[in-house]
Amino acid sequence: MADIEKTPQADTNTPSLHGSATGDIAILHERQVEHIDIGLGLYQKSLQYDPEQLARDALKVRRKLDWLVLPMLCGTYLISFLDKQTLNYSNAYGLQEDTHMKGDNYSWVASGQYFGTMLGAYPANWALQRFPVGRLLGIMCFVWGIVCMLQAAVFNFGGFMAIRIVMGFVEACVSPACVLLTMSLWTREEQPWRSNFWIGTNGVASMIGALLAWGLGHATGLAVPNWKLIYLVVGAMTLGWAVVITLYLPDGPHNAKMLTEYERVVAVWRISKNKTGVKHSKLLPYQMKEALLDPKTYLVLLSGSALGILNGSVTTFMSTLIKGFGFDSLKTSLMQMPGGAVEVVWCFSFGYISTLENMMGASLLLGCVPGFAGLVGLLTIDRTKRYSLLACAWIQSALGSPIVLNWQIPGFNVSGHSKRTVVQAMQFATFAAGNVVGPHLFLPREAPKYKSAITGLLICYCIAMLLQVIYMGLCFVENRRRDAKGYRAQTEEEAREGFEDRTDLENKHFRYRI
């Protein structure tokens, strides 16, 4: 920006790893830091500038990131979710009949994508730690666009199962990449709302997908069935978007093309208060072990798996539920649009609430209430009141908000790059496992009420909320313990420690967000 002027406090040498802005050297802590964070150099440069100037310019940098990078994350997540939902939309146009699926074959095909995600969770997180995030995501987007189009060439259950597994494996990088970029570009206070923006595009994708499926359903005289046309159109859209993010999506604040060199310094200074750094490529065994021994890890994983069961059920069987209320194929597609609007509104609302002080966990809990109430309605409302049942189905889309808030927990409550990588890999793997289980709760013999499935989903909501309460309690107790022992330091020192790749258990100045 032309209106941002550099005003260094002094012409000093670049500070050393543990030095101040004037070059003073502090003593290294007991563990030798062998691989420093890629943002450390830019943070050291920021110490040469007036903090008040940095604070003023930080607002301008944040606006740039909000207007230029956030839309790219939203577009990527939108196209990814649209690809996933193609199975749901195509199911309304004779997919099962044309591919000779029987019994629970459709449930297994729906689970296939998440089998792939489970297999790809660790390789995806490892690759994101080692390679440039933007380019890796762009390449994967191109590949899964091709795979999406290939679904139109499948003619049987086995072929569909195989290709959905491949798609899940390739798309395994999408959510962790969005989480990683959000964590490295915005502050802890800003992250939840921004994250709800990009996951809120699931709702936009649902509306676009429903309208697209409705429109393609009217196409006649084609050489291919309508359900195949859905895969071809969405796949082509994906290929076009892949080019955009490959060229323009940054890997972090250190190489964002839309920022000047000075603005990159400001961008790193902005997120230094997170105390989690930006990124480095070294995986440290002791941090990986700590991730496995930390009890908070398993509370996050189990809660995420419960939410995964809910997600796998809602995204896969929405059209089946609505069709069971007595609507034809075309109207079933159109009737899914309001559910998308619900997701957008709920994600933005609870995303904003989560930015308030000590409201992160509470927002996750409150975000579970609408879906829970809707399931109770589906279980108790008379089947003749189909529009009341339809409303209960629509509000299931509010699930997107607690899901993304759960995904954000490792981003701002787990410090140490290797530890966070392991936690996130396991988190997305268990979430995928939940998505595998979810569709199988819907037993064909119980159609169209699916009483057992809805009862099971109510239990999942209860489990997710209980585990979140326990997690919040542990974090609260640990924060109070550290405060009572006086673990505090100068702001600059605490910020620098975030670039030393210490874990949240090592860094006593770290505080968990509740």
Image (cartoon, rainbow, N blue to C red):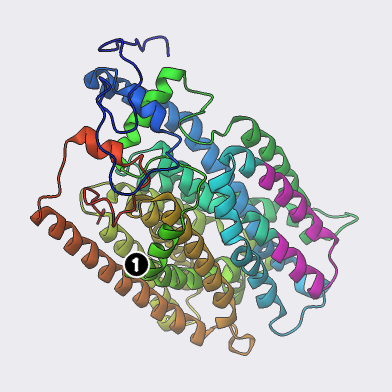
Q: Residue furthest right?
A: 223
Above or below — where is 263 with respect to 210?
A: above
Residue depicted at 25% across the width and 12% down the height: 9
Magenta stretch: dominant secondary structure: helix
Does the stretch in magenta take in 103?
no
Foreground pick, 108 / 188? 188
Q: Quadrant of the N terminus?
A: top left
In the rendered image, residue 454, in percent from the top left (x then y), is placed at 47, 80
Residue bearing the label numbered 1: 294
Above or below — where is 70 with respect to 465?
A: above
In the rendered image, residue 204, in percent from the top left (x then y), is placed at 53, 48
Q: Quadrant of residue 448?
A: bottom right
Number of numbered markers: 1
Foreground pick, 454 / 262? 262
Q: Quadrant of residue 396?
A: bottom left
In the rendered image, residue 397, in percent from the top left (x then y), is placed at 47, 61
Residue depicted at 68% across the width and 76% down the height: 108
Q: Quadrant of the C terminus?
A: bottom left
Q: Which stretch appears magenta?
A: 139-166
